[in-house]
Amino acid sequence: MKKTRPWLRVFLSGFFVLLCAACLGNGPRDPASLVAELDAELPTVVASGNSPSIQVAVVHRGQIVWSQAFGQNTSVNHVYMNASVQKMFTAVAILQLVERGLVDLDADVQEYLPFTVRHPGFPETPITVRMLLAHRSGLAEFSHQFAWDTECTFSPQYRPSCPDHLIAMSHQEFLIASLMPGGSNYNQRAWVFEPGKEYHYSVSAYPLLRYLVGQVAGQSYAEYMNEHIFDPLGMTSSGFSADEFLERHTIPYTRIDGKNIELPIWNGQGSMMHTTAEDMAKFVRALLNDGQYGDFQLLHPETVELMQQTTSRFKIVLESSDDLPRKGHGLGLFILGGGWLGFGGSAPGYQCLLRFHPSRQVGYVIQSNVNGILGNNYESARSDIYEAQNALVSILDPTFVIRHQVGAMAVPMVPFVGAGSVWAYFMRKKPRIVTVVGAVWIVCGGAWMFAGVLVGFGLLLMGIIGLVWGGVNLLRTRQAPSETEA
């Protein structure tokens, strides 16, 4: 029988070791040990930041196993705004209407609206509900959308400009003024790519979908959300008016020149969501359980699966230096690195992250009451919530970093594998040196990899090849005399 080439045997052995290391820790976690880790890690991480408050809830195997609030004037019952994370809830509402046969995902959206919705550059191309959910409608954002949503309630030095006549408009009036040619807020530059052809994240697509929910359901968006999502899930601390939670609504802040400046609480035209991390964790529980929450079916399992299917793959990974990598988009959520799904949101005074991992059966929600949108410290304000996220991911998904690096280095690692294999082969007569150098490469590569330096994985792989190859040759060298004597 022909023997396997030594260098190939060594390479396969090293790769097997790496795969075992990557899989280590991916089994079911004991809830008690998980909670102990969260208790030990999260308070320290949050205390090192500069957010007025942070609220966190963690889901594990169908249960909310950990819920804490840190900082000033807060508790687990205090209410925050979840900003763009609300898009996930709106998407679920649309998909519920699809399940009831009231909406067709591929129907022209204007079939459900009392006004025309057309891309001015492609007036013959229908814009479908699916396109709006997937950010593929060609719509970017309406002029003054940000200012209109916030009702211009901020201090003069950083108040968004918006004409008075737009501020006074209802939701329907604003949409008509922005969508209809000749409308007082109409601007062709709000439209970019041909509908259905390319992905473009749209701030304005989801206000249009919120309006569609009300039109189809025959009740206001807020009434529908309360009846069909909030109440059945027991989300008793969720609503669309800050006045509902006057005694326990967190105060929003903006970060200006490194300082947290208090803002007034605003309602966002009465259709922006106010909620707690625990309430949203109940929503996460349903999505992790094929849409089931107790006796309530939020969505059918096949609809949950549809929601999570990739509708757009990003050619370039969209990520901040701290956030989970965004690999694509589904229907109302991002497809993130390492098997994670979810959404993130930023609004004046608030930030929110909602993430869940179906195969690991874990998820989390983080809320903060400071943002830097209105000032010059956006990254500074975001760093605290991402530090909390990094700590959570390291506990809930301890092999995420190495799995993500494996994917990111799939092609670039080839030169490292080749270089490591060739070097080890030609140094086969000096196994001690190969072993020592391999060990050094493993230490350096591992440190770089966990520090976020991609080449660290390649160096780690080279080290494994060197260590295994050198170790095998050392054993063979030591066994050789005894075999001769025999």
Image (cartoon, helix red, strand yellow):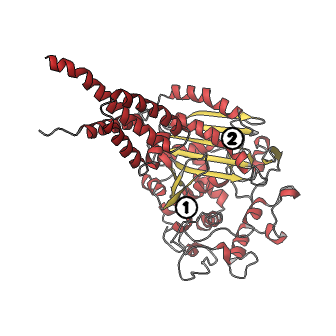
Note whether residue 214 is visible. Answer: yes
- The quarter of the picture where residue 469 lies is top left
Residue drawn at point x = 61 percent, y = 53 percent: 227
Residue shown at the point (56%, 25%) measured from the top left: 36
**Residue 287: which numbered mark, if any?**
none
Visible residue check, residue 293: no
Report the residue at 74% width, 44% height from top: 369
Q: Which residue is mark 1?
A: 94
The residue identified by callout 2 is: 384
Residue 443: image x %, image y %? 48, 31
Q: Locate the C terminus and report the quarter of the image it occupies.
A: top left
Which residue shows up at 77% across the image and 63% down it?
Answer: 147
Q: Given the image, on which type of amino acid does mark 1 rest?
A: Ile
Above or below: residue 15 compared with residue 373: above
On the image, which quarter does residue 50 sit in?
A: top right
Q: Is residue 46 left or right of residue 193?
A: right
